[in-house]
Amino acid sequence: MTAISSFSVGGVTVIIALSSMGLPIALAGVLITVEPLIDMGRTALNVNGSMLSGKITSRMLGTFNKGIYSDKDAVVEQTEA
């Protein structure tokens, strides 16, 4: 249900934005089909920022292990918080 409602909210938002700028509403179809690609880029940027902040924090705290970080065969174990 959440996925369905998120699609409709995005569509309505695009239509409102286009009509307020005086652009044709038919352009909404094009924008909605391109949106997943744009969203993937935003997600990749967010993940990259999270990874970078974790690395910087571990270096500042002195807990960064360059050997494990550079080891291509290292396995990250899942731990419970």
Image: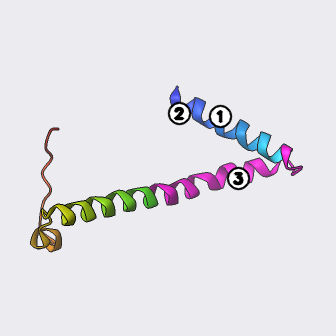
The image shows residue 6 at horizontal and vertical percentages of: 58, 34
Quadrant housing the C terminus: top left
Q: Indicate which disc, 1 or 3, sits on the residue closer to the N terminus.
A: 1
Q: Amino acid at mark 2?
A: Ala
Q: Secondary structure at mark 3?
A: helix
Horizontal side of 49 relative to 58 (left or right) equals right
- Which image quarter: residue 58? bottom left
For the residue carrying disc 1, how many other residues have a C-alpha within 10 Å: few (<14), some (14-19), or many (20+)?
A: few
Horizontal side of 46 relative to 35 (left or right) equals left
**Mark 2, residue position:** 3
**Mark 3, residue position:** 31
Residue displayed at 10% across by 73% down: 67
Q: CA distance from mark 2 to mark 1?
A: 10 Å
Residue displayed at 27% across by 65% down: 56
80, 36: nearer the viewer: 80
Question: Is residue 24 within the magenta segment?
Answer: yes
Q: Indicate which disc, 2 or 1, sits on the residue closer to the N terminus.
A: 2
* Magenta residue span: 20-43
The image shows residue 4 at horizontal and vertical percentages of: 57, 31
Q: Amino acid at mark 3?
A: Leu
Q: Amino acid at mark 1?
A: Val
Horizontal side of 70 relative to 57 (left or right) equals left
Horizontal side of 72 relative to 7 (left or right) equals left
